[in-house]
Amino acid sequence: MATAYRPYEPGTEPRGQLVPAVLKAPFQGRVWREFLYVLISLPMSILTFVYTVTMIALGSGLLITFLGVPVLGAALAGCRAFGVVERARARALLGLEVAEPEPVLGRRGGRGGRRGPVAWVGALLRSGTSWRHVIYALIHLPWAVLSFGFAMALTFYGWGFATYPLWRWVFPRYVDQPGLEVFGDDERGRHFYLDAPFEITVTCASGVLVLFLTPWLMRGLTSVDRIMVTGLLGPSRLASRVWELESDRGTVVDTAAADLRRIERDLHDGAQARLVALAMDLGLAKEKLEEDPEAAAKMVDEAHGEVKLALQELRDLARGIHPAILTDRGLGPALSALAARCTVPVKATVDLPQRPAPAIEGIVYFTVSELLQNISKHSGARTAEVDVWRTDDRVMLQITDDGRGGADTATGSGLAGLAERIDAVDGILVVHSPAGGPTTVTAELPWR
């Protein structure tokens, strides 16, 4: 089944929109912010390089004494401070969001919770993040020199040649030349000036060409800076993964607590209240058994009906915790049962070569259950489809309806909580729901 959305592919823009974008590219604020970033990079990289090389060399030379260790610590601390400035500069001028790296002493303050100066310097020297800042300071200078030269040449030559007809009058009036001199040989008396109409036109055209190429070349230059800032000044992959797992663990704990509160509330307000009323009715029937057998029999009959209702509520509650059909027969029959209970006609298709992990099965089941409830209550749809299949080591789930659309994970409609649950197991939830429909919700979960 085809999805209702596609990733962006360069070259698919309508022609009427592509040409104006190219024409206005040299005047966009993004290009000038990138140019400003490249200009500032040179003095910043010189300052950082000089500081790093000086402090590292001084600290290494003083290692024969006790002073070498604190000097190296100061060098690493200074590099981390420069890293803060670089991340802020990339955020302001390149729009690059880079998370803060792991603190020097971590979240527990190092071994045994110590936070003294000695522990702090030792943690600095052991920190891989600190040494990545040093590497950034050393390798960024040659790249900053190269990108500075390219950016200055492209910008000034492009704008200079493109506007050459506007300022060519300077040469005959103040320099006593017919135009810009390209080649000159005083011994042979040969000089070549850009003064003929054809030469002026070619110069202006070449400047315009460079001007239109500059935004893309500038983006290429700053993309290298983006890679260096993200890879060397941000958190390591291991630290990012640890933070992600901590966040996912919190989500799982909160979800489990919410489920327990829901079960307790359903038991208290549903089956428990009905059983308490049943016990009272049976007590009254027992008292009237000898005085009014017919009334007692009627009360027992009513109590029998209450027992059936209580059993049905307990079955529904057990199905909400983990349905027996899912455990016994798998996702295919379980999703077909869900589709049969939905108020909207639903076509369910499950194409799995084997059963995934039980936890993933449960998440797929309850994801489909909640999405079908949303379709029944809010979408106004006439039909819906549920597709589940496997791709490599991932379980793919897609639900489509022809309702009114407008669903969004940011509106607090239950989709946000569903996205958090799926994210807790390294899954992804994508919602494509334009106004007027159709709505397509795609979930991707790990197989194990």
Image (cartoon, grey):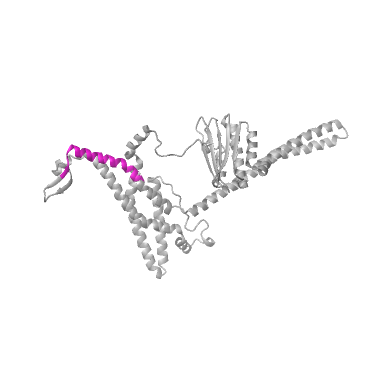
- Number of marks present in the image shown: 0
**In the figure, residue 308 lies in which quadrant?**
top right
> What segment carries the magenta color?
192-219
**Of residues 69 and 95, the one drawn nearer to the viewer in this rendering:** 95
* Quadrant assignment for the N terminus: top right
Residue 214 in sight in this render: yes
**Relative to 320, is 147 above or below?**
below
- Residue drawn where x is 61% and y is 47% of the image: 357
Horizontal side of 74 relative to 352 (left or right) equals left
Residue 163 in sight in this render: no
**Is residue 218 in the magenta section?**
yes
Horizontal side of 318 relative to 211 (left or right) equals right
Give the residue at the far front of this rendering. Answer: 353
**Relative to 405, is 358 above or below?**
below
Give the residue at the far bottom of this rendering. Answer: 64
Residue 396 image position (x, y, % from top left): 55, 42
Residue 217 image position (x, y, % from top left): 33, 45
Horizontal side of 433 relative to 233 (left or right) equals right
- Residue drawn where x is 84% and y is 31% of the image: 295
Residue 268 image position (x, y, % from top left): 70, 40
SS assignment for the magenta stretch, majority:
helix
Residue 137 image position (x, y, % from top left): 37, 56
**Of residues 240 and 54, the one drawn nearer to the viewer in this rendering:** 240
**Of residues 63 and 228, the one drawn nearer to the viewer in this rendering:** 228
- Residue drawn where x is 65% and y is 39% of the image: 333
Give the residue at the far right of this rendering. Answer: 290
**Is residue 69 in the magenta section?**
no
